[in-house]
Amino acid sequence: MTNNLQNTLSKPSLPAVPRYRDSLLQRGLFLVAATIATSAWLVMAGRILSDVHPIWDLASHLSFHMWILTSIATVVSLIGLRTQRGESRIRWWHRCIMLLPPWLYFCFVTTPWHILPLTTNSVDAKGLKIFAWNIWISNKSPDQVLEVIRKSNADVVALIELGSDQARVLKQLESEYPHTLWMPEESARGIAILSRVAETRFRVINLADQGMPAIEADIPASDQHAGYRVLAVHTRSPDLHQRTLDRNQQLQSLAEWAMLPAKPGIIVGDLNITPWSPPFTRLLNRGNLTDSRKYRGYFASWPTDLGIFAIPIDHALVANGIEVLYREVGERAPDSDHRPIALIVK
């Protein structure tokens, strides 16, 4: 027995299996990647279920932000796969499996390549220039608004959330824009269109019979542009139930308006929806419309306080076939939570 014990003690011990301990930084990266992956799955599910209940549609407006976050987290995970070994490598592999499906989904939904400046976008182009802006009903700086509009040098100006106090100041523009229709209200329904194109005619449209007036301006053709119907619109802001449904009905009415057998249509204004929401996609498809942002930029317009984290809810949609020469979003403007937008069409 003593000999057996001595033989056992004399046997060489096996080499210890190396253990890979995660650094504090790597643990933090693991946690962040997992959090982003979980959030991305929730947002993806929300967008897929957006037609089931209005609350889910709100998630779709974060699609582009989630694409950016999942892109960053996926790159970090791939670097971890490349550089780590053992248990750490397995963990990074798990993160990649979690991140890849939502990243591919948001690539499909947001088509991020559309924000690349790959097509004509010249502010000096000759054509019909349209300027649209939600100036905000509580705006206390109408004189500054007046200067921003004059600086735009637009042929057609659409104003959203126009109150009586702002209208009294802005009516100074009638000497420069002799064709106008003012419909100010002490609510988000206030709206106006100003045109300096001769023989412009106006028509008021009650979208989906919801008491939110839209103004159509029939713009005659000139030697610089074809004739167009320009519709200034403000749809209802979404909530967790009824207002979102009302907005979707208004969007359906916009598609029907765009399909009318008349001059090609251009829709401008605050649509209270991002390009990644399913109702917006249906509006483009049913109305045979093109988003003028395409291949020109991201053009976030609201809220201005969020800067690069803001979202594009102010839109300029044109009938398929209309040539867009310029599209832009203005700088942060005085006393408004929206940035103005502008486009030039031929």
Image (cartoon, helix red, strand yellow):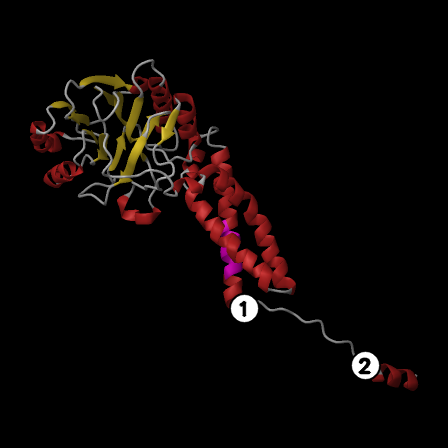
Question: In this picture, which residue range is highlighted in magenta?
Answer: 29-36
Q: State the predominant SS element of the stretch in magenta.
A: helix
At a point 79% along the width and 79% down the height, the residue shown is: 13
Within-10-Å neighbours for mark 1: few <14, some 14–19, many 20+ = few
The amino acid beneath tag 2 is: Pro
Separation of residues labelled 1 and 2 (CA atoms): 32 Å
Q: Is residue 5 left or right of residue 286?
A: right
Q: Residue 226 at x, y = what percent?
A: 26, 22
Task: Say how many tags the image has.
Answer: 2
Residue nearer the viewer, 101 or 129: 129
Residue depicted at x 84% and y 85%: 10
Disc 2 packing (10 Å; few <14; some 14–19; many ≥20): few
The spot of residue 11 in percent (x, y) is 84, 81
Q: Is residue 22 magenta?
A: no
72 above or below 301? below
Quadrant in which residue 312 is drawn: top left
The single residue placed furthest to the front in the displayed view is: 223
Image: 17 above or below 56: below
Q: Name above or below for residue 2 compared with residue 32.
A: below
Secondary structure, mark 1, is loop
Residue tagged 1: 23
Q: Residue at x 41, y 36 (%)?
A: 58
In front: 128, or 35? 128
Q: Are marks 1 and 2 in contact (CB under 8 Å)?
A: no
Give the numbered dot on residue 240.
Answer: none
Q: Which image quadrant for residue 318?
A: top left
| 65 relative to 346 in the view: left or right | right
Question: Quadrant location of the C terminus?
Answer: top left
Q: Earlier in the sequence, mark 1 or mark 2?
A: 2
Q: Is residue 330 visible?
A: yes
Return the mark for residue 12. 2
